[in-house]
Image: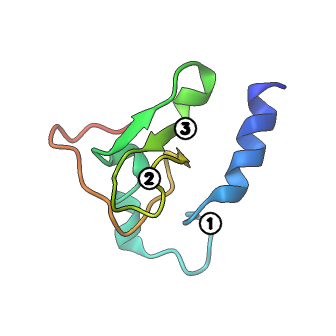
Amino acid sequence: MDDGEVHGRWLRLLNRSTGEAGYRDEWFDEQCGGCRFWIALRGELGLDWGVCTRVDSPFDGRVRFEHDGCERFAVREDGTFG
């Protein structure tokens, strides 16, 4: 199985997509990749994917796309992304 196949399969798990009609402007700055509870995977998939570690998030322990998001977002103190 290659990374492209995994990436395509996991994209179906998105909670929010910037291409959706109902995507709110404020969500743009609240993407998983900028959350202090998001930990990037290693290798090629780690360029776009990580794991949520926020215990009170519905996505705790799940693989998340860096541009996805949820209502439990918490900005990283150093302001980094990804």
Horizontal placement of 30 versus 3: left or right?
left
The residue pinned by badge 2 equals 60
* Quarter of the picture holding the N terminus: top right
Q: Quadrant of residue 20?
A: bottom right
- Position of residue 14 measured from the top left corner of the image (x, y, whole percent): 61, 59
Q: CA distance from mark 3 to mark 1?
A: 18 Å
Q: Position of residue 65 (x, y in %)?
A: 55, 47
Q: Pointer 2: residues within 10 angstroms few (<14), some, or many (20+)?
A: some
Q: Earlier in the sequence, mark 3 or mark 1?
A: 1
Q: Earlier in the sequence, mark 3 or mark 2?
A: 3
> Hey, which quadrant is residue 27 in on the image?
bottom left
The residue type indicated by label 2 comes to Asp
Question: Nearer the viewer's eye, disc 2 or disc 1?
Answer: 2
Which residue is depicted at the point 51% across and 56% down? Answer: 68
Residue at numbered disc 1: 19
Whether the residues at callouts 2 and 1 have beta carbons within 8 Å, the answer is no
Who's the residue at 61% across and 22% down the image?
Answer: 44
As drawn, the residue found furthest toward the bottom would be: 22
Left or right placement of residue 16 versus residue 38 in this view: right
